[in-house]
Image: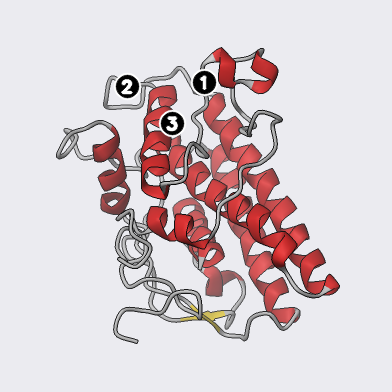
Amino acid sequence: NLLLYQAEFLLHASVDAGINDISPGLVQGPDPIGATIANFSNPVRRVIEELGLVTVGHLRALVQAGILDAPITRPQMDVSAEAYAGFVNVAFNVSTLTPPFNIYANTPSFVAAAKGFSAFIQQYYAGIIPLIVGNVQQQLVTRIGLSQSAGLGVLRTLLNDVINSTVQPYTFTAAELSNRTSEVVNQLGGCGVKAEGLIVPLQLGAENRTTSNVVPGDVNSLAYVRFEREILRMVFGTGNATMPGGLYRDGFIGSLYPRVGD
């Protein structure tokens, strides 16, 4: 469910394409709601496209390993600007920003959202890898998790490059956007601070010696771990693992979480 969202989100934003445009027949099910091409510079567009293509490869690898059946069924996913605006409105404690927040308007707005979602995948994989049964399966999931971590680092670096820039047309900076939305994610997850912005107090930086935070982690700079219920609370945007909404209007597909009505 998470990989499907990430692939569609990044590909549509960068080149206005979906998973089946890249790998025909790999997926089936409803198209994402609100898919929009984003306003990027060409270098950033190439990076976002590559990360989307990488995720398609991960999905195909799961099919080839027999972990997933093809075509993979997509849940109903909401990648609209409105879906993300809801999180940002909460972050800035307003009913609606003026003008309404649009993640597709510029690089800082989009990358702030993309790195947050990428972190969900990295942290979830960090949590489940020890629980995977079978050496072949565990090795595959580990390789995917390592690749996803690299992608997260790229996204955080892209945002760090513009960290002190104002996010147009507002007065707040990319740093403030990153920090405030991370706070919302932590509140929804309900399991402490595992989402961190790009600038942190010195006591939270690596070895308490830096306020930059391109590579977030715990006191030993190890990746944070999340499990199913935390992920569901966050991506549903409800703080409730059994109440779909947010980025997945009808919930997840599969044995972990059934669609509404199933």
Residue 39 visible in the displayed image: no
Height in image: 247 above or below 259? above
Residue 102: which numbered mark, if any?
A: none
Check disc 3 and report its element: helix, strand or loop.
Answer: helix
Asked whether 60 or 233 is in front, the reply is 233
Q: Position of residue 106 (x, y in %)?
A: 39, 36
Residue 208, image x, y percentages? 65, 15
Residue at disc 2, secondary structure: loop
The residue mark sitting in front, 3 or 1, is 1
Whether residue 244 is visible: yes
Label 2 – label 3 distance at C-alpha: 10 Å
95 left or right, relative to 120: left
- The image shows residue 55, relative to residue 85, as above or below, that is below
Q: What residue is shown at x 37% (from left), y 58% (from top)?
A: 79
Color theme of the render: secondary structure
Earlier along the polypeptide chain: callout 2 or callout 1? Answer: 2
Question: Where is residue 218 drawn, in percent x and y?
Answer: 63, 33
| Residue 177: quarter of image | top left
Q: Is the C-beta separation of discs 3 and 1 under 8 Å? A: no
| Residue identified by numbered label 3 | 178
- Tell me the quadrant of the picture where the C terminus can be found: bottom left
Residue at left offset 29%, top offset 53%: 83
Above or below for 88 versus 52: above
